[in-house]
Amino acid sequence: MTPLLETQDLVKDFVIGGEVVHAVNGVSLSIQHGEFVAIMGTSGSGKSTFMNMIGCLDVPTSGRLMLDGIDTKRLTGDELAAIRNQKIGFVFQQFNLLARTSALDNVAVPLIYAGFSLAERRRLAQAKLIEMGLGDRLQNSPAKLSGGQQQRVAIARALVTGPLMLLADEPTGALDTQTSLDIMSIFQGLNEQGITVILVTHESDIAEYAQRRVLFRDGKIIEDAPVSNRKGRIKNG
């Protein structure tokens, strides 16, 4: 089976103070459809830069990035934006919700760019919020939601276009311990439904919910192994 994601000798350089910094330095990685992978590393290890590239938010300096069989190097900026909207859902640490907009309209935003009608946007957004247990919070603005509820809205927004892959960047970083467990339970449940989940975290206990752990250091992968003693999903979480 063709991997969902494959990188070959991926490099991303930045020029800082007249010097070239290799933020990502020759990374080769393959992720199959339906995997749950945790990408770990300390600040400056290259994990977030790598995630920006596989999410088509940034382009490599060199190397190859294949996403669902597509060579992204051949794509224009508009084509990369279309790939992001169709195939990738993003979940961030700070939720990135529109502050003065209802949960329903926040979730519907990606559908605007995908060309859905107003009625379809509302129908699909409502369905995802109900799936996240927020059917009674459709009209609430982010200020009227807890941190955990805001992250559920963000997950619903990430899922509403039916992506192949979820990219989650420190999704529990702004949450308390119990709420973090609830969110990881949601990710495991989504993965059980066949969605590929790629999670960036610096927390080893959060990484233990994944199937596989990839550790970055100085822009390189220094470890890539299955998670031993993987934590199971809280079935009612």
Image (spheres, grey):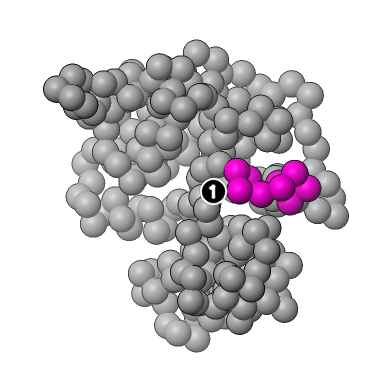
Q: Secondary structure at mark 1?
A: loop
Which residue shows up at 53% across the image and 36% down it?
A: 200
Local packing at callout 1 (Cα closer than 10 Å; few below 14, some 14-19, many 20+) is some
- Where 149 sits versus 104, above or below? above
Q: Quadrant of residue 205?
A: top right
Q: Is residue 130 visible?
A: no
Three-letter amino acid code at disc 1? Gln
Q: Is residue 107 above or below residue 86?
A: below
Residue 178 on the magenta span:
yes
Residue at screen point 38% across, 53% down:
84
- Percent from the top left, x then y, of residue 120? 50, 81
Instruction: Give the magenta range.
Output: 172-180
Residue 156: x and y in percent read: 59, 63
Q: List x then y, in percent, for residue 186.
A: 70, 51
Residue that mark 1 sits on: 93
Is residue 73 shown left or right of residue 97? left
